[in-house]
Amino acid sequence: MRINKLLSNKGICSRSQAHQLIVAGRVKVNGQLCIPGQWVEETDEILLDDRPVKEKERLYIILNKPVGIVCTAAEGVKDNIIRYMNYPAYLFPVGRLDKDSQGLILLTNDGDLASDILEAEKGHEKEYMVQVDRPYEEDFLHKMSQGVNLGDGVITRICQVSAINEDTFRIILTQGMNRQIRRMTKAFGYNVVRLERIRLLNIALGPLAYGEWRKLTNLEVETLKSEIEGNKVNQIEQNK
């Protein structure tokens, strides 16, 4: 794999930060200065500041993201989630929750797990509570659940939708299009006024306070990985 990916997988830094370390001459591979984008093997001797690169402890944290925080690690973006967290070790957000939305976002330094979660075709469940700008019509939830034409030939997957009250509903998606729920409701003439993610796979937001974060338990991490592997197997079976 490329050196940037290896350093990211080991929880050392992001791929872009790895590039900066390489350009600064701080990374060596088998005694030679590394070059940007260099291919390496796990068996290579890799040094950072002349010290062997060791895999960092895996971190798994969920944040109840406030509205206004941007799900990016890019340092140049105002109100980015990493600056908001101010965590003392390298983390990055898994996926996105748009700036105007709130709720559960997973942060980790486990690149492999993040990649598995982000592969939308795996069918991982994400659950949201959504409030629209007025009471919805009787057949609105049924239409939302059957797949929505977003234009340009894009039709969303069938999903689970259930009522909470006259203007609020619960929806479970297995895909992750940009601003998908807002676009789905807009197709029927409604605007979202509050959108909160409350679950990702087996990880539930629960009583976690708005703007607060916590580490996942060992059981939550084990169950999360098990669900991901189970979804992989199901996808393979479906593709046969």
Image (spheres, rainbow, N blue to C red):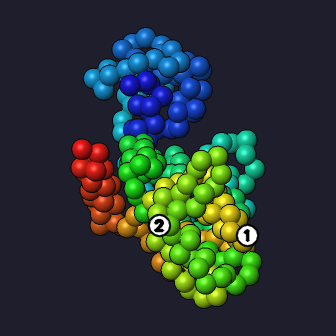
Q: Do the CB atoms of the residues marked 2 and 1 lie less than 8 Å apart?
A: no
Q: Residues within 10 Å of mark 2 (few under 14, many from 20)?
A: some
- SS under mark 1: loop
Could you tell me the amino acid type at mark 2?
Cys
Residue 67: mark:
none
Q: Earlier in the sequence, mark 2 or mark 1?
A: 2
> Amino acid under label 1?
Gly
Q: What residue sits 29% from the left and 45% below the top?
A: 239
Residue receiving disc 1: 189
Residue at the (28%, 50%) spot, across then down: 238
Residue located farthest toward the bottom when viewing the structure as drawn = 165
Q: Position of residue 226 (x, y in %)?
A: 27, 58
Please name whichever residue, 62 or 31, is drawn nearer the observer in this view of the structure: 62
Above-or-below relation of 44 to 15: above
Q: Which mark is residue 159?
A: 2
Q: Nearer the viewer, residue 23 or 172?
A: 172
Q: Secondary structure at mark 2?
A: loop
- Which quadrant holds the N terminus? top left
Q: Would you say 12 lies left or right of 99 here?
A: left
Of 155 and 123, which appears nearest the observer? 155
Mark 1, other Cα within 10 Å: few <14 / some 14–19 / many ≥20: few
In the rendered image, residue 220, in percent from the top left (x then y), is placed at: 34, 66
Position of residue 140 in the picture relative to residue 172 (left or right) = right
For residue 105, say whether it is visible. Answer: no
Query: Picture coordinates of residue 156 (x, y %)?
Result: 53, 57
